[in-house]
Image: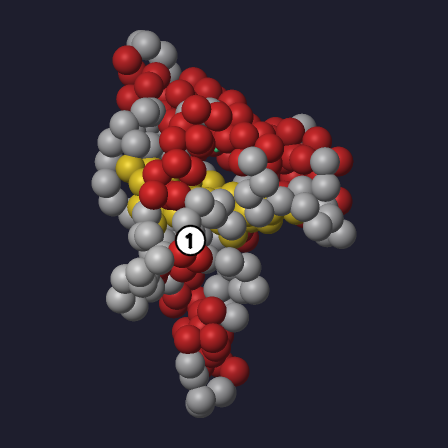
Amino acid sequence: MSAGDRGKLPSHVAFIMDGNGRWAKKRMLPRKMGHRQGVKALERVVDACAERGIGMVTFYAFSTENWARPQEEIDALFDMVAEFADTRMTEYVRRGFRVMFMGELSALPDKTKDAIARISAAAKDNTGMIVNIALNYGGRDEILRAVRTVVGSGVKDVDEQTLSDCMYTAGLPDPDVIVRSSGEKRLSNFMLWQAAYSEFVFMDDMWPDFGAEQVDAVLKEYASRDRRYGSVKRIG
Ligand code: FPP
């Protein structure tokens, strides 16, 4: 472990919330009940991360590929996002959290877009922990969007910073650690640009079972990792 990272808290933890469907199926419940419990897990994880002093948390709530799901499930998910924005996020704003949503939001139902716009406006002057929700988000789509912006701007001298500045996360830290629940071990088009040096933690727990205990396991695992960013191991 490099001296700089030993025992350090990550600044940014990103979560791929997987396993809601399997959690529900095991209990013979409709898939949307799994997502509903998933929202409760998200709330527990936000609280645990805030208590432990993490600066930014990102949650993958809906991918550009998730439109292939049954319409009833899609509608239920966007209703939950609208409800979450109007209720729990209102409390987050009171607690000083910054809230942000990344993805192609124009395609979302009006009710969800309106709730997002209201809560984003209410949080605009906050300076606390950032709660970032990825909605209709795809990593390749984000990179393409950035390339198009740069090409459209006519800038010729393009470097990494130029593209980073066009990502949804411009000016924010890359995830130090990306966590995926439910035993699956892939990125599924999540934060492809930002994941360049992220640590990965794959956990067997289904997302609806996540809470403070899993957050602590992630932090312990992260603290044990040796982050070298392509350099060699430093002694001492
Ligand atoms: C993946 O599990 C989960 C999703 C695609 C949706 C995650 C969304 C939430 C937890 C709710 C989001 C709401 C707010 C308020 C941000 P899956 O359904 O693919 O599970 P499976 O692989 O077991 O079928």
Residue extending farthest to the bottom is 156
Horizontal and vertical percent position of residue 72: 41, 27
Quarter placement of the C terminus: bottom left
* Residue 180 quadrant: top left
On screen, residue 84 versus residue 78, left or right, reads right
Looking at the rendered structure, the kind of residue marked 1 is Asp
Q: Residue furthest front?
A: 236
Q: Is residue 172 left or right of residue 206?
A: right
Whether the residue under disc 1 has CB within 8 Å of ligand 1: no
Residue 39 location, x and y as percent? 50, 27
Q: Secondary structure at mark 1?
A: helix
Nearer the observer, 177 or 163: 177
User: What residue is rendered at 44% in x and 31% in y?
Assistant: 216
Left or right: 205 in relation to 10: left
Please state the total of marks drawn on the protein image. Answer: 1
Q: Is residue 136 visible?
A: no
Q: Residue 23 at x, y = what percent?
A: 33, 19
Say which residue label 1 marks.
Answer: 5
Question: Closer to the camera, 9 or 182?
Answer: 9
Label 1 neighbourhood size at 10 Å, few (<14), some (14-19), many (20+)?
A: some
User: Going 37% across and 43% down the picture, which residue do you hit?
Assistant: 222
Give the image location of residue 141, x and y in percent: 38, 60
Residue 188 higher or lower than 38, as above or below: below
Note whether 23 is above or below 94 in the view shown: above
235 and 156: which one is in front? 235
The answer to whether residue 197 is visible is yes
The answer to which image quadrant residue 49 occupies is: top right
Q: Is residue 107 above or below residue 145?
A: above
Question: Which residue: 55% across, 47% down?
Answer: 56
Residue 80 as seen in the image, left or right of residue 184:
right
Q: Residue at x 73, y 48 (%)?
A: 126
